[in-house]
Image (cartoon, rainbow, N blue to C red):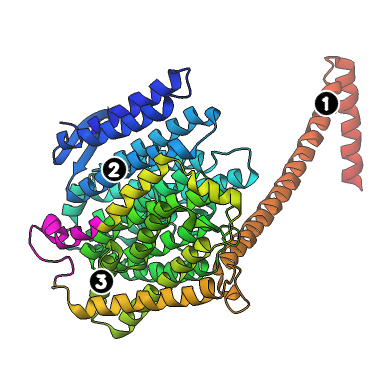
Amino acid sequence: MTPFIILVPLLVAIFAIALDRSYSRAKYVAAAAALLSLALFPLVGSGTQSTSWFSVGSTSITLTTSVQPLNSLLLLVVMAIGVLIMVYSWGYMNLPSEQKRYYIEMLAFEAAMLTFAMAGDFIVLFIAWSFLSMTSYLLIGFWSNRERATAAARKAITVVLIGDIALLASIVMFQNIFGSLQFSVILSGIGGNPVAALPVALLFVAVMAKSAQFPLQEWLADAMEGPTPVSAYLHSSTMVKAGVFIVLVLFPLFQAAGLLQAILVIGAITVSIAIFAAATENHVKRVLAYSTVEELGLMLVAIASNALLAAIYFFFVQSFYKALLFFSAGASMKATDSENLDEIKGMSSNKLLLITTVFGVLALAGFVPFGGFFADVGLDYAFSTNLVTYALISLVSLTTSFFIFRWFFLQARKGANRQAQLNYSATPRSMSYSMAILAVAALASSAVFFFVSGIFTGEGGLPIGSSLTMSDAVIETALVAIGAAIGFFLYLRKRKTAQPNRLTRPAYTARAVNAAYFHFAGFVEAIAEAMDYTDMKINGAFDWVGHFTIGIARGARRFASGSINAYVALFAIGMVVLVIVVVI
């Protein structure tokens, strides 16, 4: 059966919500459609299917879908979290006037990501890739009455469009090189031979834009101006993971093109920038945004180091705890009516919120036995042969633990006003239940670590190819504990604010990157203005020549009266002038 069957409930729901005059039913229709799509997944089966779309001369354009283990993993994550996103939105999106547009755009966003997850060729990939760009633009700028939201949406679509253009150029080159756009044909055509680096490099530019890698990472933090459920979906299982996913799918292509070292460097730079930014950021959602940028960079570093199974497991387990942390941030923002970590306090007023948030924090920090711990162990094992790299990865684990516990302790502090405490206690059940389910998933997903190797290679054993040792657990747990202790001492015991001090402020490289964007944009604008000025002068010169020629022609036309006497007189005058010139 065609994999596109799972899209049917979503597409039907979009039209049903659009045609329904009632706002109140939109949320239930959206959640039911997302749940039905998930229920239909077992009917999809596995394998590759191609359908003829249209023909141009002797060239036939086909749509190819692929449902392999990696595709199935992404499909399940997108659909499972999609259901929870819809349910969470019941309590978060309050205004009736927002309901229809919000759920239509969210369903379209999910449909685009599911289509991308099933892509078996560049045609389907590009359609879904571009549709993701459009829907993310609409959702990031959902609150169009806010200037910052519209600016963030424009920034996101501008950066992502750079990747879309690069992707389109690479597709044209792949067609010329391999004579096909199907992934299976392209990968089989490599045959261990070197591949032209330019088309693959252009493809990676698209990956950098979509997955927010240096120097195109800042749009993702600005995208936090969208509704929190959108942020949760964007960072956990959709869009930003599209770039990492395509590198996993086409890994042999990047390897044959000799780009793995470049990917490693870019991923490492991105991780460094994101860590410093997250450790000094005050906005409750932007801290999580930078942590996502860091995680995506780590995934690419693992892929470039040929630690594919460790990257796949990280890709999977990150989805649950990241959605959970964004849900928690949304609950805090809703209770305190603030987005600043200096002002958000009193999370402990709601015990369920507190406990579920702790689960998410421990998972992201890498505390045993949560999924983040096994992800970190997988990465540690991948780099264990190089002492310097292993030390750097360990430092990343420690600093990650520090900034996420800093994020948590600042919110958990006491001191919230009475109204905030009441708001925390009145957190809608749909939001609380969604968080509880994700908290369980953040813990239960760790079990996949022991099976992922068998799923993707057909063999038993751990994804890192070795039994988990006690030293792995001790080292990773110690790093997490040290980071947590530093965060506790600085931000809970001493009651410090989130404002960075003079020593950490220079490390906030996001400002430098944004400044570089600003200056580059100014440079391009200056060039454009110079070209416009030159164009105006050139056009003015041509206009003058044209008007001068027309004036001469109009003057000459007066002598073309048809009178023989006038012609004879002119001839005589001309002869006299000629004689004078010759004599002189």
Which image quadrant for residue 563? top right
* Secondary structure at numbered mark 3: helix
- Residue located 32% across and 68% down the image: 366
Spatial CA distance of label 2 from label 3 is 26 Å
Tell me residue 221's x, y (percent): 51, 56
Between discs 1 and 3, the one toward the N terminus: 3
Quadrant of the image for the N terminus? top left
Q: Residue type at mark 2: give it.
A: Ala
Q: Residues within 10 Å of mark 2 (few under 14, many from 20)?
A: some
Q: Residue 456 in magenta? A: yes
* Mark 1 or 3: the one toward you: 3
Which image quadrant for residue 370? bottom left
Q: Residues within 10 Å of mark 1 (few under 14, many from 20)?
A: few
Q: Is residue 232 left or right of residue 246?
A: right
Between discs 2 and 3, the one toward the N terminus: 2
Tell me residue 367's x, y (percent): 31, 69
Q: Residue 185 in magenta? A: no
Spatial CA distance of label 1 from label 3 is 87 Å
Q: Is residue 219 left or right of residue 196?
A: right
Which residue, given by chain and number where applicable, does mark 1 sit on?
A: 554
Q: Are marks 1 and 2 in contact (CB under 8 Å)?
A: no
Between discs 1 and 2, the one toward the N terminus: 2
Which residue, given by chain and number where applicable, does mark 2 sit on?
A: 80
* Secondary structure at numbered mark 2: helix
* Secondary structure at numbered mark 1: helix
Q: Residue type at mark 3: give it.
A: Val
Q: Which residues are magenta?
A: 444-465
Indicate whether 231 appears above or below 359.
Answer: above
Q: Are marks 2 and 3 in contact (CB under 8 Å)?
A: no
Residue 377 is marked as 3
